[in-house]
Amino acid sequence: MNVDERARLLRVALDAAARGWPVFPLTPGTKRPALHGAARCPGTGPCAGGHLGWEQRATTDPDRIRRAWQTRPFNLGIPCGPAGLVVVDLDTADPADPDDVPPDEWAQLGITGGADVLAALAERAGCPIPATHTVDTPSGGRHLYFLAPTGPGAVVLRNTSGERGQGLGWKVDTRAHGGYVVAAGSRVPAGTYSVANACEPAPLPAWLLQRLSPPPLPAAPPAPITTGAGRRGRYVDAAVRAETGRVLDAPAGQRNSCLYVAAVALGQLVAGGALAEHDARTALLSAAARHVALGAYSSRQADQTITSGLHAGARRPRRLGEAA
């Protein structure tokens, strides 16, 4: 065991915790969590009351950190949600992949990577990117650390990937609730993550918050939706199938957000009296089980996301009625 490397990474972990950023171990030399997944959970120790994923087990406790990092030279993961961060990941094109080129809309602007895309978006918004805590990645990319919005009614941001959904664009990902970043000081075969700007994270710019915020909930209909005699149950069944399908077909990087959107939609029907909450929750958990098995999120995280979505949907009840 490389004692010097273990000691170095322990210092890195303690420094991150001193900033108030919880950390969890990544397998040495990789970006993968060193903690067991839901499918292999022994149900003992920290998981005695149910599986806990990396987001729940991350810590700022110096004693816990010392006990972990004294055993192996773990790399470090920082869970963005608990750390109060939104990290903008600016990637670069893969020179070994001839198909990894910018889409036409970006290529026409001379865009060559995520940093160019973000700069173009900032120019369109008329707002410069503020100086903020920045980490260079071994692949030539950059992580820009921003403070997530806080306070009553603050928007809960989740991960985005490229141009999908609420994504910012080609080669730009974001990590927030449900996501983590590899901390500076961690080493992978391609090199070491290093601090490029050690200043404190700046608040997430308002224009970026607007771009990344999930779409508003649909307005509640002014009157019950009429489905026609005898069709009320079939309408609800179709809605449940559609939303569980959304969960099952969710692409990588959007699985948790799709689960949340589906829970909001069914939460509206629950609040309107058309669907029992138990039935909605059971259907969503069953659909999410596929992604739990793949390690996309833990069963506990899935349940928390569903609860949040059902509560959000309850604020906009959707009532159904049948024609006479």
Image (cartoon, rainbow, N blue to C red):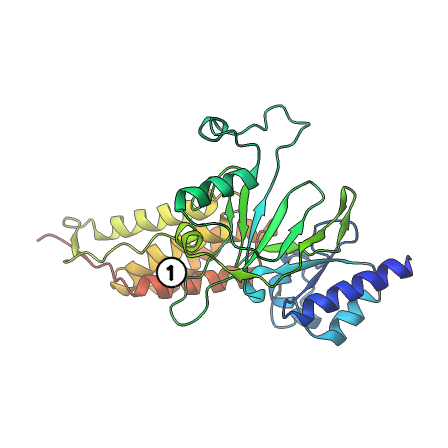
Q: Residue at x 39, y 53 (%)?
A: 210
Q: Quadrant of residue 80?
A: bottom right
Closer to us: 113 or 27: 113
Whether residue 87 is visible to the viewer of this picture, yes or no, is: yes
x and y percentages locating residue 220 in the rendered image: 22, 58
x and y percentages locating residue 74 in the rendered image: 78, 58
Q: Is residue 107 left or right of residue 20?
A: left
Q: Amino acid at mark 1?
A: Asp
Q: Looking at the image, how many numbered discs can be counted on the residues?
A: 1
Q: Mark 1 highlights which residue? A: 279
x and y percentages locating residue 61 in the rendered image: 70, 75
Q: Residue at x 43, y 50 (%)?
A: 127
Q: Crowding near pointer 1: few (<14 within 10 Å), some, many (20+)?
A: few
x and y percentages locating residue 314 in the rendered image: 31, 65
Q: Residue furthest top?
A: 98
Q: Residue at x 40, y 42 (%)?
A: 124
Establish if 132 lies above or below 189. Answer: below
- SS of the residue under disc 1: helix
Q: Residue furthest left?
A: 324
Establish if 31 lies above or below 153. Answer: above
